[in-house]
Each structure stands twice: as C-alpha cells, then as structure tokens.
Image (tube, helix red, strand yellow):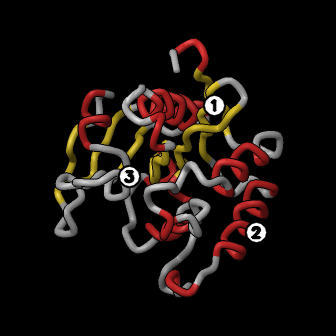
Amino acid sequence: MNASTLSVKSLSLDTLPLFLRFFDGDEAFSDNAQWSFCYCQCFYEDHNLVKWSQRTAQENRALACSRVRSGLMQGYVALEGVKPVGWCGAAPRRLLHALDDEALPNDEAVGTVVCFLVAPRHRGKGVAKTLLQAACAGLRGQGMTIAEAYPRVNAKTPAENHFGPLSLYLSAGFAIHRKDTDGSVRVLRKL
C-alpha cells in the first residue's frame, strides 16, 4: 500500500456498506475475533442502562445502521482503492453516552476519538495516522474546539491499542491531560 492509494471517507448512508463490509469481513478481526460483535457501538450506549456483555453482533449491527441513518453515529473508513482497511470512531462527545457520567464544563465543544481498527496486514503503514487526521478535521468542521481520546499507556497488543496508541496522539499534537487508574490517559488537542 502506498499513500496515493489510501483514502478516507466519513461514515454516511453512502459509506455505510463499506463500514459493514469491513466489520462483517474476516480480515478486520482476524487477530481479535471476540470483539467483532461491537460494530463500534460500545461508546454510544449508556452502560448504566445497557448490559454490554449481553449484546449480540446482530443487535449492534442493527443499531449501527439505525444510528447512521439518523445521523447519530460518526466515524471514518480508510480505503485502499475501494477496499476498506481501517476504521476510526470519532464523534461529538454528546453522542457518546458511555461518557455521560463524566461531565465536562464545555462538552458541547469536545469531540472524542474512541476507536481504531486497522486490518492486521495494513498496520504500521500510516492508516491510523491518516484516520486520526481525518477525524480531527471532521470534528473541527462540526465546530468542535477540542479533541479528546483515551489511549492505554501500557497496551501490549493491537487489541489493547483499540483506542489508538499514545504515540499516535502525541505525534499529532495531543497532550496528556490526566492519567486514569484503568491504565489509560486522557489526551487533548485544540482543533
């Protein structure tokens, strides 16, 4: 893969089939099959109301489709030519109900990057970096003035790095805002 064949498209009704093709396929979760049920719905749910461990892939897939149709799910699909090879979930914080318990004074101005998924054979080739650039531009275009993310400092596997590696954020101008007891840090960047 070279940079000229990589493109990024925002999630919409037109790109929903690409998102589904990526999440439904074998390649995206070939080294982490147990997470293939998520369809990037985890952060859209209020975990005080939903028992996440009981959710099925079919339920999450249907919710992703419904949320895209109603404009309540956002993210970016990376393509090599016409083939989806990566995903970044990023949206205004107000849409991500898993974070509702942690109120921010300016949460209407905050966009959150919640997930990265890059097909194993495309890792280490700049896909996540390109997705993060698109996510920040997309959040800025929606009027967000701050982007936040929660990478895990001690992540050892690609699955543990599903929030994106800390080094990715630091190289993109994010700064550590705080360290959490769960092994993650909150990083922020002005947009």
Where is residue 161? Give x, y as percent: 33, 52
Of the 4 image quadrants, the one containing the C terminus is: top left
Where is residue 127? Give x, y as percent: 47, 31
Could you tell whether 127 is left or right of 84 in the image? left
Residue with the mark numbered 3 = 163
Where is residue 189? Give x, y as percent: 33, 36
Question: Quadrant location of residue 170?
Answer: top left
Residue visible at 56% across and 64% down?
36
Q: Amino acid at mark 3?
A: Phe
Where is residue 125? Give x, y as percent: 41, 26
Could you tell whether 4 is left or right of 174 in the image? right
Up-down: is 12 above or below 6?
A: below
Label 3, label 1: how many angstroms apart (C-alpha)? 20 Å
Residue with the mark numbered 2 = 62
Badge 3 marks a residue whose secondary structure is loop
Label 3, label 2: how many angstroms apart (C-alpha)? 23 Å
Counting other residues with Cα less than 10 Å from the Cα at mark 2, is it few (<14), some (14-19), or many (20 or more)?
A: few
Q: Nearer the viewer, mark 3 or mark 1?
A: 1
Residue visible at 67% across and 32% down?
9
Residue with the mark numbered 1 = 79
Up-down: is 177 above or below 76?
A: below
First of labels 3, 1 by sequence position? 1
Q: Amino acid at mark 2?
A: Ala
Q: Amino acid at mark 1?
A: Leu
Up-down: is 49 above or below 75?
A: below
First of labels 2, 1 by sequence position? 2
Could you tell whether 83 is left or right of 1 in the image? right
